[in-house]
Amino acid sequence: LLQSTVDQVQGRASGGLLSVGAIAAMWGASAGIRALMNVLNVAYGVQETRPMWKKYLLSVVYTIGFAALLTCMAALMLVGPRPMNWLARQIGLGHAFVTVWNVVRWPVLVVLMMIVAALVPYFYFKRRGWL
């Protein structure tokens, strides 16, 4: 069943199916962000004062921002020494560049994770005027 579905998608242009899937994924992820907003409101005993349209718009913007950070984090984990060797040769950099990349990519990944974890309360407190 899975193979036939994959063959159908590959065999014809299914831009509509891809668009519906992307919209559904965005809607589901932004619903998770809205749920997090509600949980933070309950946890801190704050009444929601924003109009519904603003809450939905902010949840989509936050979702896109977090997706971009998570994509960067995944790229840092996946881009290892081989692609960086190729890139270093293309640019004309030496083996030291690849060594530095292998050492630096993990601390950068940790910093990005900390940024993601810090942005949620930051935006929450900033909106409340507590920052």
Image (cartoon, rainbow, N blue to C red):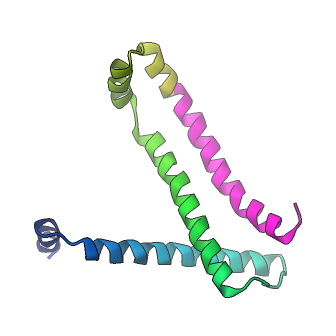
Classify 94 as above or below 131.
above
Q: Does 112 appear in magenta?
A: yes
The x, y position of residue 57, in whole percent, is 61, 75
Q: Position of residue 44 (x, y in %)?
A: 83, 76
Q: Quadrant of residue 87?
A: top left
Q: Nearer the viewer, residue 105 or 54?
A: 54
Where, quadrant-wise, is the N terminus in this rendering?
bottom left
Residue at the image point whose x is 61% and y is 79% from the top: 56
Compared with residue 38, is residue 62 higher up or lower down, i.e. above or below?
Answer: above
In the displayed structure image, the side of residue 53 where residue 19 appears, left or right: left
Q: Kindly give the residue lying farthest to the right in the view shown.
A: 130
Q: Position of residue 82 (x, y in %)?
A: 33, 28
Left or right, residue 29 beside residue 91: right
Image position, residue 9 (x, y; %): 17, 70
Residue 33 can be seen, yes or no: no
User: Could you say which is closer to the camera, residue 54 or residue 2?
Assistant: 54
Q: Is 14 covered by the magenta stretch?
A: no
Write the residue at 49% across / 78% down: 27
Q: Which span is picked out in magenta?
A: 103-131
Query: Could you tell me which residue is drawn at 38 percent across and 20 percent down?
Result: 91
Image quadrant where one finds the C terminus: bottom right
Q: Is residue 91 left or right of residue 115?
A: left
The overriding secondary structure of the stretch rendered in magenta is: helix
Residue 50 in which image quadrant: bottom right
As drawn, is 41 to the left or to the right of 69? Answer: right
Number of numbered discs overlaid on the protein picture: 0
- Residue 98 visible? The answer is yes
